[in-house]
Amino acid sequence: MIDLYFSYRSPYSYLILPRMLKLKNESNININFKLVYPIAIRMPEWFDKKNIFFFMSMMSDFKKKAQLLEMPLNTPLKPDP
């Protein structure tokens, strides 16, 4: 059994989900999905130490990984307030 800590807000969760489901189907492995709160709720102070360049580099990383996996990655039409 694999525990998968999943956040709907995390691009990394979005990118791993199809691969985890493929692993589950091809290897007959049970996946225990554990939904977690977004980091903004769990640790709001985390954002105090980050600057805009950190977030720009993170988005660049997400986009590269999505391209490599041939997955669409778009910004939300209505981002959170």
Image (cartoon, helix red, strand yellow):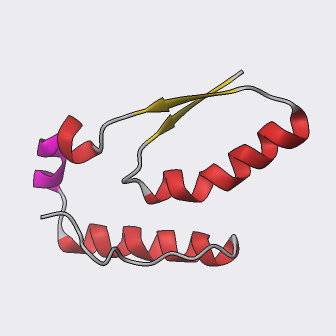
Residue 35 sits above or below residue 7 on the image: above
Bounds of the magenta segment: 43-49
**Residue 52 left/right relative to 74:** left
Q: Is residue 26 magenta?
A: no
Q: Main secondary structure of the magenta part?
A: helix
- Spot occupied by residue 62 in the image (x, y as percentages of width and height): 49, 69
- Spot occupied by residue 77 in the image (x, y as percentages of width and height): 30, 78
Residue located farthest toward the front when viewing the structure as drawn:
78
Total residue callouts: 0
Please tell me which residue is depicted at 40% across the width and 72% down the height of the picture.
Answer: 59
Please tell me which residue is depicted at 34% across the width and 74% down the height of the picture.
Answer: 76
Residue 18 sits above or below residue 3 on the image: below
Quadrant in the picture for residue 57:
bottom left
Quadrant in the picture for residue 4:
top right
Quadrant in the picture for residue 43:
top left
- Spot occupied by residue 63 in the image (x, y as percentages of width and height): 51, 76
**In-front residue for pair 68/71:** 71
**In-front residue for pair 63/75:** 75
Please tell me which residue is depicted at 23% across the width and 70% down the height of the picture.
Answer: 79
